[in-house]
Amino acid sequence: GGAAMKMGLELLEEMERSNIEVDVYTLTSFINTAKQDGSPHAIATAYGMFQSASIHTRRSTRVYATMISALGRASFVDEAEQLLDDALSIGVTPDVFMYGAAMQAVADRARDAAGEQRVRRLHARMLAQGIADSEVTRRIMSRLLRRP
């Protein structure tokens, strides 16, 4: 975990020094490396990279879904949910994968009534945007219904 993160950071820093723009694939790979590492520090580092990447690089639902998922893994639930609005602000329309990642982040970390309400609100927002459920979002909602 830590060695891969270190190598990824070195690569990104070398790209920056050489004026090579980080593309969607490189950024997504780095975020996934941080997610595999799982530490809040690694994920916060990836989030910093994500935020400093050009809008052109970030203009991908795949990058957003990956970042949302990683933030959720490290319990950065507010940040994960906020990325849905951040995406909209740069012209990226959230898709079922982004909503699924945000719903999963909230459902995994906020296991109280307020957390359940947040998941329901995210789900309602997704449906209101005309986005159909996926297997993931259906599973998240059915688990909520089964909770005692």
Image (spheres, rainbow, N blue to C red):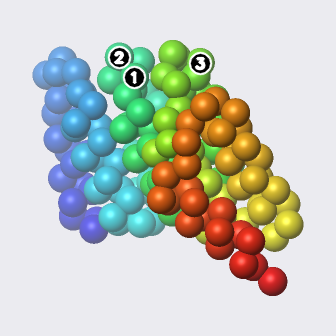
**Which amino acid is tagged 1?**
Arg
CB contact under 8 Å: marks 1 and 2 = yes
Inter-mark Cα distance, 1 to 2: 5 Å
Picture quadrant of residue 85: top right
**Which amino acid is tagged 3?**
Ser
**Which amino acid is tagged 2?**
His
The image shows residue 47, relative to residue 118, as above or below, that is: above
Inter-mark Cα distance, 2 to 3: 13 Å
The residue furthest right is 113
Mark 3 neighbour class, 10 Å CA radius: few under 14, some 14 to 19, many 20 or more:
few
The image shows residue 53, relative to residue 145, as above or below, that is: above
The image shows residue 127, relative to residue 116, as above or below, that is: above
- Residue 56: x percent and y percent? 35, 17
Q: Which residue is mark 1?
A: 59
Residue at screen point 70% across, 33% down: 128
Q: Which residue is mark 2?
A: 56
Residue at screen point 45% across, 37% down: 64
Mark 1 neighbour class, 10 Å CA radius: few under 14, some 14 to 19, many 20 or more:
some
Element carrying mark 1:
loop
Mark 2 neighbour class, 10 Å CA radius: few under 14, some 14 to 19, many 20 or more:
few
Element carrying mark 3:
helix
Q: Which residue is mark 3?
A: 89
Which disc is residue 118 wearing? Answer: none
CB contact under 8 Å: marks 3 and 1 = no
